[in-house]
Structures are given as C-alpha cells and as structure tokens.
Image (cartoon, helix red, strand yellow):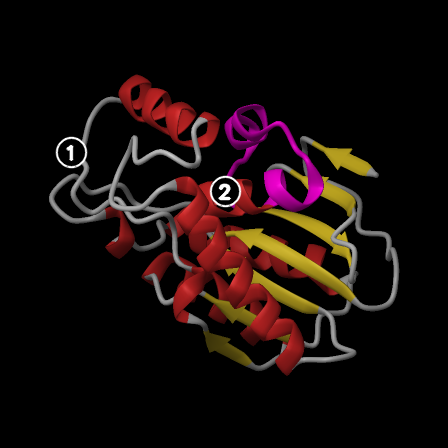
Amino acid sequence: MMICYGDGDNSEIMDKLLILVRHSISRQDPTVSAHQWTLTEEGLARCELLARHLQAHQPSVIVSSEEPKAVQTAQAVADRLRLPHHTEHDLHEHRRTSAPYGTQAEFEARIRRLLEHPDQLVFGDETGGAACDRFQAAIEKLLAHHPQQTLAAVTHGTVMTLFLARVAGVDAFSFWQKLGMPAYVVLSLPDYALLKIVAVVKD
C-alpha cells in the first residue's frame, strides 16, 4: 500500500478500482449546518489538482453526496475530466445537524468518541455504525450499477473514515486526524484492500 501525506504519486495501479474522495476545502459558517457549507475559492482551485491526481486512475464516473461542498468538488473534477457526475443521497456525512458549533478541540473530542464507540449515540443524530451501514449500502449499490468501471465517490471525512475502519482496518481517529481537504484513497475490488492513501492533495 502507498501512503502519501503530501501531494501523492500519480502512477496508475490497477484496473477496476474504488476511489473514495473527501471533498475540497469548505467555508465554515457557524450560522448554518455544516451539511450546507460550500467550497472556498482555494477549495475550488484545488479541484483542478485533484482532477489531475484522479485521472491517473482512469475513473469512468464521478458520484457525490448531495451536500453542496461534495457536489461542487465532484462537478469540478467531472468537468475537468469530461466525465458524467451524479449524486447519491446516502453518501452524505454522519448526521449531526442537532450538534452545537464548538471549538476545534471540542469537535475533535466528539469525533473521537464517535469513532471509538460506533455503536453508541455519542455525537449527533446517528451512531457511527448506522452512518457506516448507510454509506456501505450506498457504495455497494453504486458498484452494482457501474460494473466493470472505476468509480470515484466524493464524500466526507467522518463517514469515509468509519467505512475504511470497517472494511480496511484503518485506525479510525488517527486516520481521520490526518485527512486534509481534498484527500482520496484507492481500494481494490471486490476485497476493498487499501492500495493508496493521499491524505491531502495540494501543490
């Protein structure tokens, strides 16, 4: 497995793959739910570099959650690579619309509890396990709809981490802490073996 905590390597790996992408840099706004945040100007600019990275793995289709920051990321990549893009509702982030907006330290502590206790409702509006079940079902449905194609799914840091902890055995909180925006991982199919991690795509 290749692990990159910088800008990564663009060499091709295999044939049919699953690429999970964390959206690009979002604009934090405490007056609205994080589920409604959009990308910053820098976030939009980084989508160009992200597209160049993903092109090396030859995706056939770009799918995203319905959250604006994911849609913007996916659409920018799809436009650059001239690929189709569509949304899938259940790729959205762990539900936490009822959670208060706090400091970064408070947020990290809540995420840690969520990742370490996925079967308990310790943060937000769904357990980590429920979020992972929903996300995994969406991924499996998408893979069934796109057989023999490499799929790039633009999603979110927490739910992506929960899924990778389940199927690939990553250390959840450590992995989550290292994820930047955007970031991506490449997995083989059908075994979900981790082939590559690029924890942040940047110049």
Indicate yes or no whether the magenta region holds residue 165: yes
Which amino acid does the dot numbered 2 rest on? Answer: Met
**Vertical relation: 40 (above or below) 66:** above
Q: Which residue is mark 2?
A: 181
In the rendered structure, the answer to whether residue 194 lies left or right of residue 27 reads: right
Q: Residue at x 41, y 36 (%)?
A: 119
**Disc 2 to disc 1, C-alpha distance:** 22 Å
Residue 37, horizontal then vertical, whole percent: 27, 52
Picture quarter with the C terminus = top right
In the rendered structure, the answer to whether residue 128 lies left or right of residue 174 reads: left
Instruction: Read off the magenta span.
Output: 164-182
Q: Residue at x 53, y 70 (%)?
A: 63
Q: Secondary structure at mark 2?
A: loop
Which amino acid does the dot numbered 1 rest on? Answer: Pro
Residue 135, horizontal then vertical, whole percent: 49, 58
For label 1, count other residues whose C-alpha is less than 10 Å away and answer few (under 14), some (14-19) or many (20+): few
Residue 72, horizontal then vertical, whole percent: 41, 64
Q: Secondary structure at mark 1?
A: loop
Magenta stretch mostly in which secondary structure? helix
Q: Which residue is mark 1?
A: 100
For label 2, count other residues whose C-alpha is less than 10 Å away and answer few (under 14), some (14-19) or many (20+): many
Indicate yes or no whether the magenta region holds residue 54: no
Mark 2 or 1, closer to the camera: 1
Q: Nearer the viewer, residue 151 or 10?
A: 151
Q: Earlier in the sequence, mark 2 or mark 1?
A: 1
Taking the view exactly as shown, the residue that stands out farthest to the front is 119
Q: Is residue 54 visible?
A: yes
